[in-house]
Image (spheres, rainbow, N blue to C red):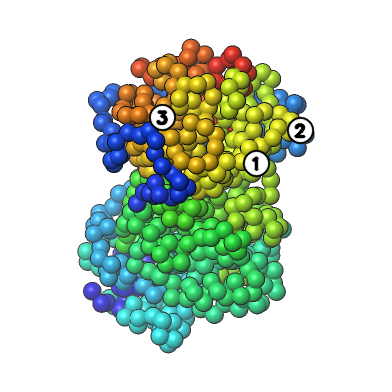
Amino acid sequence: MKHRQSASVLAGLLCVALAATAAPASASQLPPEHSVTETSPAGPAPTIPEPAESAPVSPESQEPQQSEPAQTPGQLPDLAPETAPESAAPTPAAPEVNAPSSSPAVPEPAESEVADPSALTEEELAEIIGILGAKMGQGLERLEETRDPQSPGGGEIAERLDAEDKLIISGLADPELATDPSAAAVPGGGSPGAAAQSSAGAAAPASVPLAAPALHTADAPSVSLAATWQPSGLQGMDVSSHQTAVNWNRAWNQGARFAYVKATEATSYKNPLFSSQYNGASSVGMLRGAYHFAIPNVSSGAAQANYFVNNGGGWSADGNTLPPLLDIEYNPYPSLGNTCYNMSAGQMVSWIRDFSQTVSARTGRLPMIYTTTDWWRTCTGNSSAFAAQPLHIAAYNTTGPGALPNGWSRYTLWQYSSTGPFEGDSNVYQGSVDQLRSFARQSSVGRPGQLYYRSNPAKGLEYGNASDQYLTCDWNGDGIATPAAFRNGTWYIRDSLTGTATVREVRYGDPGDQPICGDWDGNGRDTIGVFRNGMVYLKNSVTSGAADGVFAFGAAGDTAIVGDWDGDGYDTLGVGRPEGVAQRFYLTNSNIRPGVAGSFLFGNAGDTPVSGDWNNDRFTTVGVKRGNYWYLTNSNIRPTASSSFQFGNAGDRPLTGRWDRGTGTSVGVAR
């Protein structure tokens, strides 16, 4: 399939214009002394049975009289954090996107008669991607020039031809994959339809029919940025093979202090300039990181994550390496489907989760996600499932990034321009170089974590770092849950909700693990554990060292929850797992020989599972957090929404615990 014109990324795009005119981490990653003194027989995670169920249970269908009022931006309903330090008060946030109450109110990607892209050979895919591949923000640039994220403008075509020539001359690119030079003949630099007509061989491969029209909901950007405009903050840039000769010294002198460099695309493309660009940024003192351009319908998230990590997408906590970055945006290749890659929202969310968890297992760091609010709403159903990952938002204007995708109340990086002041695209970080280095190390961030407890009265405090994972348990057996922060395999535990109680520091688990806590041995005190890719590692004390129990339950991608499901005084595991449009829960009543004691549907697939003894009857039941709404059930047999209420903001992470002695479990949020 060596067709010079059809091999390039531009070929498929010109085709559309013409048509218009016509592996889980292993247990060995725990501390070396991680031996087992009480376990179930070793073996793979059990295949959890799928009992017959009725239609997915959605809390809205159970309580039709409950309507979800619009969230008040930046506010925590019913909070009265006067008991907290003044600095713990919530900071007013930019307007946030309300979580969808059931099915997403976004257009479904229209299926086209596209052959299965996953059946393409690596050679066929390489011909579609071409010499340069796609670049970060390419869809937004096209929207600005052609109002179609799948149609290139004249400027992009001219840049592509020039960059390809330079790479071919330098021996870094195969001339057989070059773009047809006649594609540059676009009158007025507009839509390349006329050029497509004169480009013999510019059709997509016969095995990959043209896609349906692209899907997107945003109009073309109304602002064309001046090449010298910069928002306030720490400046940075991103580059790819589209930039063949980056002047790093000039970029540094202009103020750039960090750079992202494209490493890979799909599982067939490597940026031929990656090493020189990555080292060039480092040589002038910039922090640098690598990004992967996703084509999610050609291979699994895990396959692309492994390809990325193996070819430059690694991470180390040296303070100079930014976290791995997933570029997930408008499909630039019409021959591979519409702007959502002909994938449903559920399929897209599963793919992103697969990619993220694999990167985390390989590097110890969840990737940052680059996207646009428009694409995220359209192609993921505005999922809130990735709020724990940093956000790199793209929006080209001079006022700000605007409304953020669901699940995020703040962004880490903002890509604000593709026209300058820096080569490639221009980005900004709202903080200092030292804060960015701390973020890169994942050692701390520029602000503490804000925790709010829905007790009587509501309480708030600052604790740990905003990027930590939080949970609360009764560490000293006094009947009151207090906080722990989990950071890169280290626990920071305190026995008080207020004041300056001593913090215990315990090393247990690995970066990327889900921390859990519970009364595993029934002695009245909660201790620690971790959940990793369907494996559970429990301690009967709050100490470092060997596990007291190891067993398989659930699978990679599940959300672990803990509770005393049968009221016997012992906490055991449960997991929540998206299944279609619903959330399925699996519960076990044993830490020795775990089997599925209960399985049922409750809530929606994008909800965050939680658990607690909501009515103080000694039995733990489940619930979900959706946006800033909570839906709780008092039964694991016939679960219906026993209560629903607002608390927190859509991007907050849920907490549960007994904040007052003798009461049932209540809810809280970490922000």
User: What residue do we see at 70% from left, 39% from top?
Assistant: 91
* 2 and 3 marks in contact (CB < 8 Å): no
- Give the CA separation, mark 1 to mark 3: 26 Å
Pick whichever of labels 1 and 3 is earlier in the sequence: 1
Query: Mark 1, mark 2: which one is toward the viewer?
Result: 1
Secondary structure under tag 2 reads loop
The answer to the question of whether label 1 and label 3 lie on touching residues, with beta carbons closer than 8 A, is no
Residue at image point 62% right, 43% down: 466
The correct choice, above or below, for 121 with respect to 66 in the image is: below
Mark 1–mark 2 distance (CA, rounded to whole Å): 15 Å
Is residue 419 visible in the rendered image? The answer is yes
Q: Nearer the viewer, residue 256 or 117?
A: 256
Is there any visible trace of residue 375 in the rendered image? no
Instruction: Reply above or below: 627 against 321.
Output: above
What label does residue 573 carry, if any?
Answer: 3
Residue 106 appears left or right of 457: left
Three-letter code, disc 1: Gly
- Mark 2 or 3, nearer chain start: 2
The percent position of residue 98, horizontal first and vertical second, equals 54, 35
- Residue under numbered circle 2: 85
Q: Residue furthest right?
A: 86
